[in-house]
């Protein structure tokens, strides 16, 4: 009465694809960050299922690292989004597509 | 455990799809919180109860609150009150509430011994083994994570300053 690890990996792949499609399709910075969170979470799910498959705690350790990385990433991403909103009065990623150089 | 896994997997996929394709940011974030709670139940069914707790506390708790905080900050203005009213509309919260109710039903089913406890899982890995691995062979990773969090803190402080101060401080 156990879940096959392949099904967990398939779920991780599906969630990752949804997140990737979100990053590629959406232009709103908040939604892009949100999709990146989905992708990070599904990568963590893949690590957990690998640890589940082999019975090692290493997968869960990697998830804790992903969690710390996601926290740092979301802080920087959201403060950048606030700065872009302050500069361009828009959350559209295309508004900030040209550099001053 | 199997029923727990498959039902939460379906809930996670539905909630994630709604979160990514949503139009209103707050509604999408509600769906994302449900998706993360479903992922926590998936982790529980995969024999990782400690990670499930971390997912609820840090991902669904801290990171999503940060998101909602920023979205609310950006919505300040005359439209904010209308926004507040629209959140009380059942259409806004009925979907996430339904999915969250499915997760609660699963949790109660699991607590009543229906799916067996996490310890009964064949591949259960207890938190002690995780901690011994984290602070043993992976200790350098802990140090690097602390450096990363410090960098994030400095970046948030630097980017979060007011525009006027920033131009005043800059040498050019």
Image: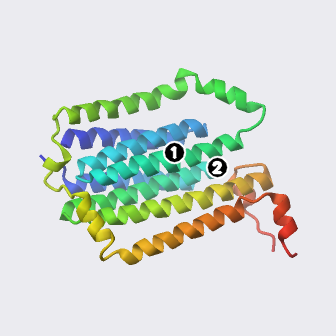
Q: Quadrant of the N terminus of chain B?
A: top left
Q: Is residue B143 visible?
A: yes
How is the protein colored in the picture? rainbow
Q: Is residue A70 left or right of residue B41?
A: right
- Residue A101's place in the image compared with B78, above or below, is below
Q: Residue at x 64, y 49 (%)?
A: A28
Dividing the picture into quadrants, the one containing residue B110 is top left
Residue B129 horizontal/vertical position (percent) = 23, 64
Q: Camera-side residue: B130 or A40? A: B130
Q: Which residue is mark 2?
A: A28
Q: CA distance from mark 1 to mark 2?
A: 11 Å
Residue B147 horizontal/vertical position (percent) = 52, 73
- Indicate the chain on which mark 1 is placed: B
For label 2, the SS is loop
Which mark is drawn over residue A61?
A: none
Q: Residue at x 70, y 53 (%)?
A: A82
Residue B9 horizontal/vertical position (percent) = 32, 43
Q: Is residue A27 visible?
A: no
Q: Is residue A22 left or right of residue B47?
A: right
Q: Which residue is mark 1?
A: B20
Q: Camera-side residue: B147 or B89? A: B147
- Residue B41's place in the image compared with B128, above or below, is above
């Amino acid at each position: 009465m156990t879940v096959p690890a392949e099904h967990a990996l398939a779920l991780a792949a599906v969630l990752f694809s949804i997140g990737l499609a979100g990053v590629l399709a959406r232009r709103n910075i908040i939604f892009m960050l949100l999709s990146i969170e989905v992708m990070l979470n599904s990568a963590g799910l893949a690590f957990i299922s690998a640890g589940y498959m082999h019975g090692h705690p290493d997968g869960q350790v990697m998830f804790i690292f992903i969690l710390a990385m996601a926290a740092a990433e979301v802080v920087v991403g959201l403060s950048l989004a606030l700065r872009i909103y302050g500069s361009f009065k828009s959350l559209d990623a295309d508004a900030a597509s040209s550099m001053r150089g | 455990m199997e029923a727990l896994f498959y039902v939460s997997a379906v809930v996670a996929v539905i909630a994630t799809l709604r979160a990514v394709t949503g139009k209103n940011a707050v509604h999408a974030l509600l769906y994302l919180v449900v998706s993360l709670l479903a992922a926590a139940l998936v982790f529980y069914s995969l024999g990782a109860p400690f990670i499930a707790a971390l997912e609820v506390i840090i991902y669904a708790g801290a990171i999503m609150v940060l998101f909602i905080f920023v979205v609310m900050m950006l919505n300040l203005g005359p439209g904010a009150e209308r926004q507040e009213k629209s959140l009380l509309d059942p259409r806004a919260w009925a979907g996430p509430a339904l999915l969250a109710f499915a997760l609660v039903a699963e949790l109660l089913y699991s607590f009543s011994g229906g799916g067996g406890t996490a310890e009964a899982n064949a591949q259960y890995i207890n938190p002690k083994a995780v901690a011994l691995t984290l602070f043993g062979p992976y200790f350098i990773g802990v140090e690097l994570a602390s450096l990363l969090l410090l960098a994030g803190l400095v970046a948030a402080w630097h980017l979060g300053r007011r525009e006027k101060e920033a131009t005043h401080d800059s040498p050019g």
